[in-house]
C-alpha cells in the first residue's frame, strides 16, 4: 500500500495515479465517453485518456507510447466506421 497524506491508499479501488483532486480518472473518462457515438472508437480513446492521465505518476514515456497506440487504433476504427457508413 502507498501512503498519501498519512492515509493508506486503496491500490485497487482508488490508486493515487488515477486521483485528480475531487475527480477520479474513471469519472473524467466516463464524461468524455458520453460524447462519442461509437463504443469501439471510445474504447480506444478511453484507454488513451487513462494512459495520458497516469503517465507522470506511473510509467512515464511508456504510458505516453501506449496512449499514442490507443489513439492510432481509435483513428483506424473511426476511419473504418466512416467508410462503412459511406458505402451503405
Image (cartoon, helix red, strand yellow):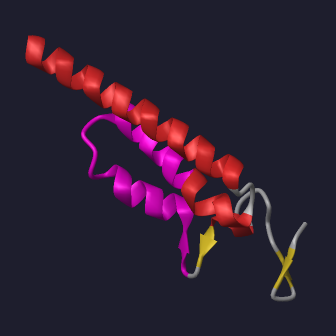
Horizontal side of residue 75 vs 61, given as left or right: left
Asked if residue 63 can be seen in this view, the reply is yes
Position of the C terminus, as image quadrant, is top left
Q: Position of residue 41 (x, y in %)?
A: 36, 35
Total count of labels: 0
Residue 86, above or below 17: above
Residue most toward the bottom? 5
10 or 81: which is nearer to us?
Answer: 81
Residue sitting at x 64%, y 60%: 54
Stretch of the chain drawn in magenta: 22-50
Residue 44, above or below 52: above
Q: Position of residue 49 (x, y in %)?
A: 50, 53
Secondary structure character of the magenta stretch overall = helix
Horizontal side of residue 76 vs 21, given as left or right: left
Is 37 colored magenta in this rendering?
yes
Residue most toward the top? 87
Residue sitting at x 58%, y 81%: 21
Residue 23, above or below 78: below
Amino acid at each position: 500500500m502507498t501512503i498519501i497524506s498519512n492515509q493508506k491508499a486503496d491500490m485497487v479501488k482508488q490508486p493515487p495515479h488515477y486521483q485528480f483532486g475531487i475527480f477520479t480518472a474513471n469519472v473524467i473518462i466516463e464524461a468524455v465517453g458520453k460524447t462519442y457515438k461509437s463504443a469501439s472508437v471510445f474504447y480506444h480513446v478511453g484507454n488513451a485518456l487513462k494512459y495520458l492521465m497516469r503517465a507522470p505518476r506511473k510509467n512515464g514515456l511508456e504510458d505516453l507510447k501506449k496512449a499514442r497506440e490507443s489513439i492510432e487504433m481509435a483513428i483506424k476504427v473511426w476511419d473504418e466506421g466512416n467508410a462503412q457508413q459511406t458505402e451503405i
